[in-house]
């Protein structure tokens, strides 16, 4: 079956550091890939998505590229801020409409001054 | 931005008791979901609901679980006789239609079964 594997956290970075959170997946066919973020006390929010190979999703300075050859969708940001502290979830969906999602475990990011 | 609202934020119950987790999806959404996350594990799909019936459910969603949209605004998850392993964060989500790919999640209900 489908699965998503994320790097374990927590990840602790200083403000303005470069962020990478690794995500790899196992799935048949050509799933859509997503990053969701959960800020403290809030629900999961869609951060970015990519629906086909070599697509790059981007939002709020975060980027991730759909790499079919390595089955990866790593999340990157060039300069993190304290306000980026949250839990980040990688996910995939076969429906194309992002309804039934297969998630990873989530990676907690803590950004300090 | 519209929100999915879940209540309560924390629920503590004794093993064997029934619990009802409540969700108010976004008002013009048509598709509703429950997910859960056991501490340290992955977020797992439980069930999807459309047009007043279950459209899909996972292996986790056994006879102890049920969902209902009792009044056109609330969407509830009932666990009939809770077990220790039901302790988890439960997320409700809603979604409007096929053309809108964005799934909106609530902030979750942390269920602790003692």
Image (spheres, rainbow, N blue to C red):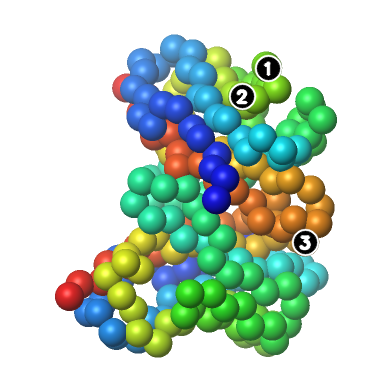
Give the image quarter of residue A64: bottom right
A76 lies above or below B48: below
Q: In this figure, which residue is indicated by the disc labeled 1?
A: B71
Give the image quarter of residue A15: bottom left
| Viewer-closest of A98 and B16 | A98
Q: Which chain carries label 1?
A: B
Marks 3 & 1 on one chain: no
The quarter of the image holding the C terminus of chain B is top left
Residue shown at 55% from the left, 39% from the top: B4
Q: How far apart are marks 1 and 2 (CA)?
A: 6 Å
Q: How far apart are marks 3 and 1 (CA)?
A: 30 Å
Q: In this figure, which residue is indicated by the disc labeled 2?
A: B74
| Viewer-closest of A22 and A27 | A22
Residue shown at 66% from the left, 56% from the top: B102
Q: Where residue B105 appears, x then y in whole percent?
A: 55, 46
- CB atoms at circles 1 and 2 under 8 Å apart? yes
Please state if B71 lies on the left or on the right of B97 as rendered: left
Res. A96 mark: 3
Please state if A2 lies on the left or on the right of A88 as rendered: right
């Amino acid at each position: 079956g489908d699965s998503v594997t994320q790097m374990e956290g927590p990840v602790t970075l200083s403000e303005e550091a470069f962020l990478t959170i690794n995500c790899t997946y196992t799935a048949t066919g050509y799933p859509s890939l997503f990053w969701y973020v959960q800020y403290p006390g809030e629900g999961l929010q869609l951060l970015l998505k990519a629906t086909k190979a070599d697509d790059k999703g981007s939002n709020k300075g975060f980027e991730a590229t759909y790499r079919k050859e390595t089955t990866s969708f790593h999340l990157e940001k060039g300069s993190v801020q304290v306000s980026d502290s949250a839990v980040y979830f990688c996910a995939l969906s076969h429906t194309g409409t992002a309804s039934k999602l297969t998630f990873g475990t989530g990676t907690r990011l803590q950004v300090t001054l | 931005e519209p929100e999915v609202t879940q209540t309560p934020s924390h629920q503590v119950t004794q093993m064997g008791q029934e619990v009802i987790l409540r969700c108010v999806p976004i008002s013009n959404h048509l598709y509703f979901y429950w997910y859960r996350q056991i501490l340290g594990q992955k977020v797992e799909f439980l069930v999807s609901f459309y047009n007043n019936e279950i459209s899909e459910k996972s292996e986790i969603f056994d006879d102890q679980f049920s969902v209902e949209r009792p009044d056109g605004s609330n969407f509830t998850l009932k666990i009939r006789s809770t077990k220790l392993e039901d302790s988890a964060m439960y997320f409700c989500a809603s979604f409007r239609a096929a053309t809108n790919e964005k799934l909106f999640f609530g902030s979750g209900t942390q269920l602790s079964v003692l």
